[in-house]
Amino acid sequence: MIAQNIRRDFNGVLLEIKTDETFSIALPGFSTLNCVTTVKAGELVPAGFNWNVCKESDTSVCLSGENELGKWLLEFAFAKNLGGINGISVKMSGVLQQALPDLEVAVLKIASLKADHILTQGIAMGGCSSIKLPANTSFSSHYQTMISAGDHILQIGFPLMQLQPGKVHGNVQDHELQDILVSYRISHFGLKKIELDPVTLFAAKDGFQLMYDWADANIEVKKDFSDMAAPGWNSWDYYRWTITEEEVLNNAEFIARDPVLSKHVKRIIIDDGWQYCYGEWEANHLFPNGMEYLAKEIRKMGFVPGLWFAPTIVEPHARIAQMDYDMLAMGESGKPCLSFQCMKRHGFVLDPTVPKVRKYLFDMFKRYADMGYGYFKLDFLGSTLGARKFADASVPRSQIVRKIVEPVYEAVNGKARILGCNYNFEAGNKVVDAVRVGGDIHATWKGICHNVASVAARFWGNKRLWLNDPDFALCRSLDTANDPDLTRLLCCLVYITPEMTDSKYCEFPLVEEVSRPQAEILLSIVLAAAGAVNLSDNLPRLNERGLELARRVVGADSGDAAIPVDLFRSDKPSYWFQKVKDYHRVLLINWNDEPGTYFFDLKKYGVTDDSAVNFWNDQIVKINDGVISVELQPRSCLLAVVK
């Protein structure tokens, strides 16, 4: 037992370890975080650890303890981030009495914390929440969680690449965060020795710099993203599973003929719908000449052909599912299971810990790269983790996605670029060139509002770790297309069941409540992301207003990811500031259903330029004494180019 309270001052970060096995941490702006450490195995929650001091110095304190589950070490240490901010790291490890199917280790359990705002990170694309308190909801966050209180922001961080998957989760109750668990979840791990990454806590007034410093500390491989930022066209959002060889070529030919689009669009990407089924990656009857022919035709027009795969998903009628059970991941029973489901399509998943699977992936992608495909969109990668068990139980779940993509990377490196879609970021940045950061976007007002937090919250990764892909740059809307089929595709009809009497929530089209002003918001956010710009419309059916949008968005300079200035104090950022080459862009968005006046003081950001134009119509934007002031109509924006 700890005989008396232990106090340490780590350069202004205060730690107190108490005799009752609780401890408190104080950082700038956060006077006291009262914490405890817990472990849980199924329903078993040991009462404590009976901690003893086993090692200490001026910069660290290490405790050892034991309970019904095993022996444990808990280390508190002084930490300093790349920006010179002082903080603290908390690291836990253990040796279990026996390997367990389910274990949660809460390195920090914080009963309550007063806050003004919390910004969470999803584990893969989408999944971010920007929550302004007071509120009543739950939250779950990965990698770096940002908690605002007064003029300081607390960052709770895990490494990007993790020994075991970690997250922060809890509840928001009025003005407080409650029942906060900073924990690692360890499932079906076959070893008794448990190694966990340190959790770091830093607090500062500049939350953006904290996030940049975290990103810089987690760069696995530095890359050149200059050619990745070139715009492309993708078949998915307009065509979905109706795409054909003919329609791909029609759009490619349209781009090649257009004097503006042809200058900027560099890739033609065939998304889901070209293959026989998930798990049998051969052309279906809608691509009668095969995929090698299509790659050659696209290259003849001067474009790089790209191709979509869901590399680990195997539908039940695929030959692998029928004959090669040893390639499939398993359920609790130890047998292959249908662990994938999307849009009512079900599938098994490949087990990347099996050498035969890794060879299969290497051979398949080498074959398609040799056909001439220079870009691969790998989808549903995180869905592989729907399986409970993998053949090699010594591989942590945090490393499964990395093991999927590694053989693909080895097969195409130097020949093709890789976009990770539904890519768990914990797989690192070496094996991908771009990652999806936003969720699925459509030309719907609901979709635009839902997606913005995830695009805004990932500014830290763009052109540092990878190229951010916010999802598609959609130009079609209710008044920018001459298309009799604009609202024909009702992809959610699959959710209507025989007994359902009210099916209105399953009948929405892919274009809804969006006209040109809302399309400008969607496209402005794509440009603010400063990453991938992929058109995904039936381009020949856009009218002149729609084509103007397409030409402007692909012709825009790609700069740094915009800073969403009000990210740490709003639900949806309205104020964005972006550096582009030797000039700047300012994006102001009115998310409301009433008009509003918006101000942006350029002087606060060191900008002395006094001329600006509206990116979307070239009209002059007035700057008075360094301030842009504009009246915005409901659901509209201003994207100002300041030079």
Image (cartoon, rainbow, N blue to C red):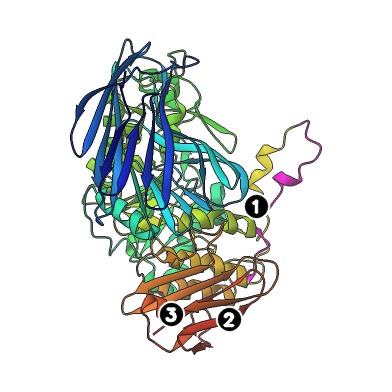
Q: Which label's residue is closer to the chain start, 3 or 1?
A: 1
Q: What is the chief secondary structure element of the magenta stretch?
A: loop
Type of amino acid under label 3: Leu
Q: Quadrant of the C terminus?
A: bottom left
Query: How far apart are the alpha carbons under marks 3 and 1?
Result: 44 Å
Q: Give the residue displayed 27% in from the left and 43% down from the top.
A: 9
Q: Position of residue 72 (x, y in %)?
A: 30, 20
Estimate the spatial distance between the alpha carbons at disc 2 and disc 1, rounded to whole Å: 37 Å
The residue identified by callout 2 is: 630
Which SS class for mark 2? strand
Q: Which residue is mark 3?
A: 602
Q: Nearer the viewer, mark 3 or mark 1?
A: 3
Query: Residue at position x 70%, y 67% from top?
Result: 593
Q: Which residues are magenta?
A: 498-515
N-term mark: 2 or 1? 1
The one nearer the camera, 541 or 341, is 341
The residue that appears at 49% across and 26% down in the rendered structure is: 339
Q: Nearer the viewer, residue 176 or 637?
A: 176
Q: Nearer the viewer, residue 633 or 412?
A: 633
**Residue underneath mark 1:** 489
Q: Nearer the viewer, residue 175 or 242?
A: 175
Mark 1 burial class by Cα count in 10 Å: few <14, some 14-19, many 20+: some
